[in-house]
Amino acid sequence: MNKAMMTAAIALAVGVAGCGKKETPPPTETAAADTAATPATPAPAAAQTPIPIDPGKPNACDKLTDVKLAATIDAATKTLKISGTANAPVAGYATALQAGPLDKMNPPNQVVLLRANAPDGATPQVVTKVDLSLDIPNALPAYKSVRVACPNAPDIELKVG
């Protein structure tokens, strides 16, 4: 009888221990259930991939408006950084800043060329903001200015700050 009572007590203890505990499905079933239960969330917006400049196309940088640029020297990496934005008249413009010559003044002026290619074919007639940036390594300790040049448009002179 003692043995029968022990067996009953163990069975009761095991039964009580399992109360309230829900079995969890294997991980593969959980993942499938989660994706089915929750509505699809849109992927985060990817960073705008720059369109490469085609040197064979004419430079349409004079079509860019509201060009806003700034120049700074990163002392830690000794890099001259030029960055900003401009407005393109239509979507699909390829834009870039390219390092140009450094003059012999003391302190020198750095010339930067603004390049833009208009898109081919029909494009939406929507003013589109484009990002512009250029990092020039091995920066000098000081510059008189950075002059951004674009054919058929006035140069933009930036103070390095």
Image: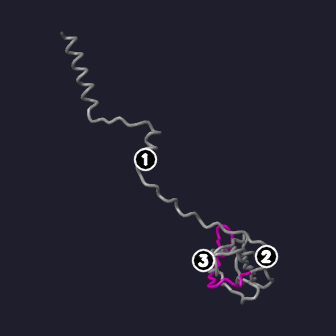
Whole-percent x, y for residue 119 in the image = 70, 75
Whole-percent x, y for residue 149 in the image = 74, 84
SS assignment for the magenta stretch, majority = strand
Q: How far is mark 2 from mark 1, CA to CA?
A: 50 Å
Q: Is residue 145 above or below residue 77?
A: below
| Left or right position of 42 against 136 | left
Amino acid bearing label 3: Lys
Q: How far is mark 1 from mark 3, CA to CA?
A: 38 Å
In what quadrant of the picture does the C terminus appear?
bottom right
Q: Earlier in the sequence, mark 3 or mark 2?
A: 2
Residue highlighted by disc 3: 129
Viewer-side residue, 4 vs 39: 39
In what quadrant of the picture does the N terminus appear?
top left
Residue highlighted by disc 1: 34
Q: Does residue 161 show up?
A: no
Query: Considering the numbered disc 1 on the image, is that residue within a helix, a strand or a loop?
Result: helix
Select label 3 or label 2 by which is in front. 2
Residue highlighted by disc 2: 57
Q: Do the residues under discs 2 and 1 have CB atoms within 8 angstroms? A: no
Q: Does residue 51 show up?
A: yes
Residue 98 picture quarter? bottom right
Query: Considering the numbered disc 3 on the image, is that residue within a helix, a strand or a loop?
Result: strand
Segment colored magenta: 60-85
Whole-percent x, y for residue 87 in the image = 62, 81
Whole-percent x, y for residue 88 in the image = 64, 80
Residue 26 picture quarter? top left
Q: Earlier in the sequence, mark 2 or mark 1?
A: 1
The answer to whether residue 28 is magenta is no
Viewer-side residue, 20 vs 161: 20
Image point 62% across, 85% down: which residue?
66
Amino acid bearing label 1: Asp
The residue furthest front is 122
